[in-house]
Amino acid sequence: MNEPGFPVDSPASNLVGVDSVSRRFPLDHNYVSALTGVSFNVASGEFLAISGPSGSGKSTLLNLIGCIDKPTDGRILLDNVDTSTLSPTRTTALRRQKIGFVFQSFNLIPVFTAAENVEFPLLVNGISPAERRRRVAEALASVGLSDRANHRPDLLSGGERQRVAVARAIVHRPALVLADEPTANLDTHNATHLIDLMHDLNRRLGLTFIFSTHDQRLLAHAHRIISLTDGRVVADQLSADEFTPTTPQEGGSHEQVLAARV
Amino acid sequence: MSKFLLLAFRNIFRNRRRTVMTLIMVGGGVTGLLLVGGFFARMFWGLRESTINDGLGHIQIFTSEHFNREEKHVLDTGIDNWRQVAATVTTGGHVRGVAPRIEFYGMVSNGEKSSIYMGSAVDPVAEKSLGFSARLSQGNDLSTKSSGDVEALIGAGLAKSMNVKVGDGLTLLAVTADGALNGVDVQVAGIVKTGFKEMDDRYVRITLPAAQRLLQSDRVTNLVVGLDKTDNTDMVAAQLGPRLQGLPQQLVLKKWIDLAAYYNQVHSLFSTIFVFLGIIVFFMVLMSSINTLLMAMFERTREIGTMLAMGTPRIWIVALFMLEATLLGAMGAAVGVVAGNLFGSLINVSGIHLPPPPGTNVPMLFSVMHVPSLMVASSILVIVSLALASILPAIRASRLQIAEALAHV
């Protein structure tokens, strides 16, 4: 297990670097700490779960990595760029180009069809209409929803909506996909389907997934699990599936585990 | 851009009940403006035509001295060679005819009582050919034949104060062009109601030859030009100006709008009322739309947060809200234009009469004109109002903290 707050060197292979990050929120005349001294690195192509009980800081951590919030202390590195030093415009551009989001409640635009929802990130990225059509078709095919392209979200099941959300998150070919409790609103069948889908996209396309969850089914598929309690990292471990027999399941640092895998 | 427009358009219909209420409100505002503005326009048109046809004509010709100096005597600044001037004017296009006039004043007496009168001498033939007619309440118009007694039309108020009726005699006294006092006996041929009490208390109309005998002059005060259409006034006035320059007397043209003081007062008053009404509609739409659009923004907080999280520039959010409001305004304007024209047509066929307007005693037909420029102006007014109303919600939406917006329930 990593010692919480360990110094992060950010080698070129690391996609995400979380360096001594703390986040405090004002509450009345005081502050409440959501995260305290969190540090870890994420390499490209990882399928990483952040787990922990409610209020442990999972969503806050994803928000910080996703550049939709800023740490009170410490820094977040994305592709070796310190995101906390970026202007709002550059931060917006970074999110637009490098990050895809999957939300617990799907957060699809209700007046758009599935295809139009998937198209939206391409629209804001200024992709040409012809290219947009091609990529949307690809993305919907990759989540198995080609035949539901022209349906609005209210005509789709929960599982289908979340698959549309996944297609929307990957359509602009981001470096990183962040998913906040993606299976929380799904039944077992749909949750399993979604997990398999995300795992498949991770393996097939080499997409880096970071997701928060306490869904054991999803945790079972994760290469690596970072456990949070009260805003602190209490465990950073590789899952059994990914470990070689000689690799300890706990106790080794993430860098050690990765080195062992290599 | 088309997708953005599509998003804005579909967002309008997310909450149909609210959209319908907004369309009714905006459309109602436009309908109200069209009905009131159309009524005013009809009133202006009616007042304009009645003012012209009551004898003002489209253009009047005076000597330039008429406006430059005070007259020493009646017709001191009159037109000498008015027949030549009339012939010159009549040769132009769009001119239906020219009517000479003498405006004079003096004392009228029934033998027992005297009163001041304001006289107008006309050529009955020319007046009739131009369609100028006195508003008779009793008797007949002046005879077009020159023989017989001198006939006069007098105002209803003057007839009452002089205690005369049709067929009675009166004596008109006036100062001649040379400054001497002269008189002529007239027979009351008819009693007129001009619609203005002050006028009816003083009005006397006789024929031009009778007035020239009374005033001992061949001059006339002015020439009234009647055209085929009021809309041709400016064009004909522009053509006539140079043609009158070569005549012995220096003459000036006055268009009806320059002489219609009452029309101008009414136009100014009702235009101000209409502008005030427009301002009320503008603020009514503005304030109620701000509330509606803020509610829409509040309901879509999480969606806006999602769009911002996906890297949508904040200015796009502003543009989206403003586009939605502008589209809503355009649709409301369309509803209002259709409803306004429909209600206007219904009013026009209903034949409703309104009480006489101030200063007149004739009931007015409630009629509404369909004015394209008013439709455009009213539509622009509500569209701009809604676009302005969307600024506050749009800015608030664009400034949402993404993390908070995503957590919004």
Image (spheres, grey):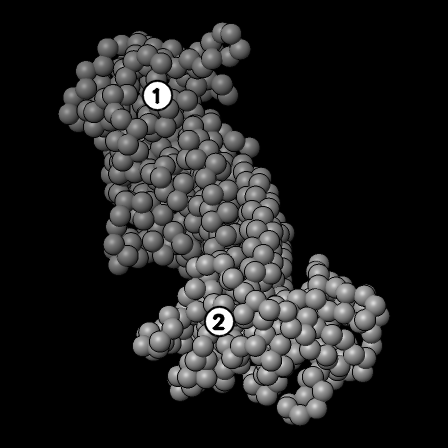
- Mark 1 is on which residue type? Lys
Q: Which chain carries label 1?
A: A
Task: List x then y, in percent, for residue B141.
Answer: 70, 83
Quadrant for residue B183, please give it: bottom right
Q: Nearer the viewer, residue A144 or B377?
A: B377
Task: List x then y, in percent, for residue B41.
Answer: 58, 65
The residue that label 1 is drawn on is A70
Q: In this view, does B60 lie to the left or right of B316?
A: right
Separation of residues labelled 2 and 1 (CA atoms):
90 Å
Which numbered disc covers residue B78? 2
Q: What residue lies at 46% left-to-right and 70% top-to-bottom? A: B62
Q: Nearer the viewer, residue B294 or A127?
A: B294
Q: Which of B13 and A231 is in front in this view?
A: B13
Q: Is residue B370 left or right of residue B194?
A: left
Q: Is residue B187 left or right of residue A20?
A: right
Q: Which of B359 and A210 is in front in this view?
A: B359
Furthest-left residue in this view:
A12
Camera sees residue B397? no
Closer to the camera: disc 2 or disc 1?
2
Furthest-top residue in this view:
A30
Task: List x then y, in percent, for residue A184.
Answer: 50, 34
Q: Are labels 2 and 1 assigned to the same chain?
A: no
Q: Is residue A45 above or below residue B134?
A: above
- Mark 2 is on which residue type? Gly
Q: Is residue B268 above or below residue B345?
A: above
Camera sees residue A175? yes
Which numbered disc covers residue B369? none
SS at badge 2: loop
